[in-house]
Structure formats: structure tokens, C-alpha cells
Image (cartoon, rainbow, N blue to C red):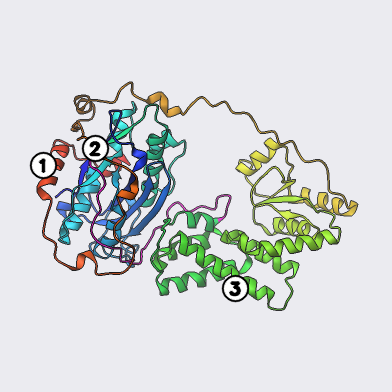
Amino acid sequence: MSIFVAGQLTRQPGADPRTVTFVLVDVETTGLDPAQGARICEVAVVRMRGDGVVLDEYATLVDPQTPVPNPESHRITDADVTHAPTFAEIADDLLARLSGAIVVGHSLDYVDRFLSAEYDRLGVALPPVPGLCSLTTTRLHLDRPDHKLAEVANLITGEWPSALPSALGIARAMAATLASLVGAAPEPLHWRGLAPVALPGQPRHTPVTPRVVGLRKGTEGWLATLSARLPYTVDPPAPRPDGLSDYRALLARALTDGRIVGDEATNLAALVGRAGLTQATARQVHEEFLVVRRAHAESDGVVTAAELRELQRAAKELAATHLIMDLEEAAAANRARRGAPLRGWRILPVGDSAEVTGVVDLAVDHGATVAVKLTRTVRLVVTDPAADDTDPRIVRARELGVPVLSVAEAHPLLADAIAAATGGGQEAGTDEPTEVYDGPRWHEFWRVRELSPAEYHDQYGGTVIDPIPPAPVADTEEFPAGPAVGRSAPVLGGSHAKSGCAVVALLGGALLAGTIELVRHLVL
């Protein structure tokens, strides 16, 4: 039985979509048809206000209790779901996040079939829930030959989605695309469909097993990317103690030399799922680690320059520089009192080789500070011998006229500056290039008018009916996310008579009649 009753974002009169909450949902599955035994093996939601503000995220692998075939399509293996919760264990947590919102899927019918099958299997009856298909929406309004999510997201947001094909990466791509459609469409869009409804049940805070996909070092370091790939969960479940212990132990070993390398980052990413970390709990673990390191450095009453540099490297990797800011300020004050010759110099290292570290340490010992990002106050960029000239930091530095020197070039320059006890030359010019803004590129593909149901059928073969007029929609506060967060008897614990099925059958059946079967990878 269907859960969602599809509405539309239309140019016809309707409710302001900025006044409601959307939940972008994606599922990864073991097959294409739940009627043939296919199950959900990953689920993710991004809960977002209609004006684009993200309120909450939730993502976890799911143990489908059946083998996971075709890992090449979604990169999920049987081993990955070993520690994952079953759908029955997360069903209440998921309902709490779907409650009081319009549920969005790129091919909503696909998401509907699998969620309906899972909740039917548990004997849970749900009221009709408003739904929106982002694939249908972009087809109605954008005259493009390709409406796959990645292509549409790139067109509308200007960026290729990251962390695909994870469910969270797909849900985030849908959220960014929808936010731009609602907020920047050439003509105002309105919601026509059911108003959001409250769903039964309270969250159970079952430990999750998030998946990190698309890990890369980037400009902020491996751990910054790792944390960003985790769900931004406002009220996260507690991590699993055994997995958390393993993660902390590996983190300590990896940061023995003050830096994370690729293999270490990959191993940490694998342990994130077993530990059940989210952005919030990962940040807490990282900050606790740095606090312990700092306490050890301060145990003898003096933080030496070498100890401070080690803390700075660890803090940069852990994205927790705010925890040692006072130590850096004190060290800078001491250098200023000594008349440090490189006071006022900010140096940006590109690379983490021993050679780069040595040059940066020399500069810091004589009053310089280390930059994390390229800003207008950076005086010198020091590069690894193997640095890529296309690195965006190097390219931008040259555009701004900031010297970009190799280790061999930077060392004598700094030595001369120290010997002469001067602050160097004038800063490079900082005039920003002027860009001409002529509107979003995707507006070029905005249809003169949205497709009618007949036109949609002729082009795409599916059936789209005129949406039902919207119920009154005011502030999202009128559509609560469910009962207050806290432990209670789960909704799955009791019996649930099937209710609302006739309404869903009448509305959902009419909406979905004639819809062609979509193969999952063709629209994502």
C-alpha cells in the first residue's frame, strides 16, 4: 500500500513552499522490486525548511537480513551491513524525521514502494503523507534532455554532488537543488497537495551505521572531509562503545606524528560506521582527543615551542584549533616581547612533507604564524617538492601576487629576513577580480510554461494529474515533528489496525496509474 500522495511545485496558485518543511529521502536497495524480496540496505533523510535551512540529517546503513547483491552499483557489501541496525530497529527514528513534512524523492514512486513494503512488513499503518517527486518537478519546469539528479543538481547549484552514490549524498543533492528551485526560480512556485501531517511514534535513538563515501584530503584535511560526510544529526544516538574504543585507538596511532595520511584516513572512515558516529559525536571525540593532548603538554607547567607545534598540527587535522587558541596567543605575545623578526608574517604551507614542516617551524620560531586558508594577509606560500601547480591555493596565490616558493627557495628567504630582522616587503595587491553576474545559468532552460499532464505523458510516458488544491499551510510549527524526543514504548511495539488505506488507494492509485517502472540508476 502506498504511503505518499504526490503533489506538485507548480506555477499555479497554492501555498508558499517556504512556509513548510521538506524531507529529502533516498534509499539504497538490494534490488529493484520489493515484491520480489528486495530490501532497503541504506536510508538517509535531510530535513529542510522551505527557505533552504537544513534542520536535521539522518543516515544509516540497514541490515536487510538478506544478501546484498551487485555492490558495484551502490558500493555496499555484506560486510558493510554486519553492524548495521535492521529496518525494524530504526523504523521509529525514521518516522520521527518524516513527520510534519512534505517527503521528497527523486523518483518518489521508488522510495514509496520500498518504505511501504518495509512498514507493511512490520504491520504499521500510516496516514496519507504528502509527497513530491523532484524528477517530475524538474521535468515539468526545465527543458533539458537529461533530468538525472547529478546533472540537474550541477545545472542548478553549479556544483557536482559529492559523496555519491551514498544515500546521504543523494539526499543532500536533492536538498540543494530544491532550495534553489524554491528560492530562485524565475517565477514563484507554489505547493499544491496535502498539508504535512504528524506521524505516530517517538524516536528510539537506535545506534546508526553511517557510511563515508568520497573521502579525500581536500584543503581542510582528511578528518574535515570525513566529518562532513557524516550526517548532521541534531539529537544523535550514542556511539557504540566497542566501535568508539577502536576509533579512538586508531586516531591516537594515526596522530602520533601529528598528521593523517591517506591509508589512516581510509581506516578511520571504516571505523566510523562501526562506532556509529555523526558529525556531532565525531566532533566531540576529536575535541576530547585534543584536550587530552593539551593536558599532557601542560602537565609540567610549560608548553614548549615544539609541543605547541605538535598541538597545532593535531588541532588542524581535528578541525579544533579553537581549543588551543589561547596557547597560540600567549606564544605570539612572548615572541612579540622578544622582538621576533618575522612577526606579522603569515605563511601557508601546501603539503605535509618533513621539508615543508621544517621551513614552517623555522618561521614560527621567529614570530610567524601558520595560515590554514589563503587570505589576503598571507605573505608567503611554501610548497612541497611534489606540489601540483593546479592546486587551487597555489593558483589563487599567484592571482593575488602572493609569492609561491618551494622549500629550497623559501628557506634562504626566511633566513635572510631573520638575519636582517625586518618584516619583509609590502604585501601583494589584494584587489579582487570583478565578476559580471547575469543570473543563474539554469534560467536559460526554464520552460515558457510548465508542462500540462498531456504534454508530460507525450514526452516522458508517465501520468501526471492536476494536483489537488492545498490545505491551508501556515508556519511549520503547525506541523510538529512528533512527540517530544525521549524514550518511550516504540510505535512498533503494539498492534496497529490498518487505517487510511482507502484514501491512499484512491489518491495514490490515481496519481501513480500508468507510471512507467524507473530503473534506479537511470535517474540518479
Of the numbered discs in the image, which one, if any, rests on residue 506? 1
Classify residue 431 as left or right of residue 483: right
State which mark lies toward you, 2 or 1: 2
Above or below, 305 against 457 in this view is below
Could you tell me how far apart the alpha carbons at marks 1 and 3 are, in whole angstroms?
61 Å
- Residue 233 x %, y %: 41, 58
Q: Residue at x 40, y 69 (%)?
A: 238
**Residue that protrudes farthest toward the bottom in the picture:** 300
- Seen as rendered, the residue at the extreme left is 502
Spatial separation of the CA atoms under disc 2 and disc 3: 55 Å
Q: Residue furthest right?
A: 420
Q: Let me know if residue 163 appears in the view.
A: yes
Q: Which residues are magenta?
A: 192-221
Which tag is nearer the camera, tag 1 or tag 3? Answer: 1
N-terminal of the pair, mark 1 or mark 3, is 3
Image quadrant occupied by the C terminus:
top left
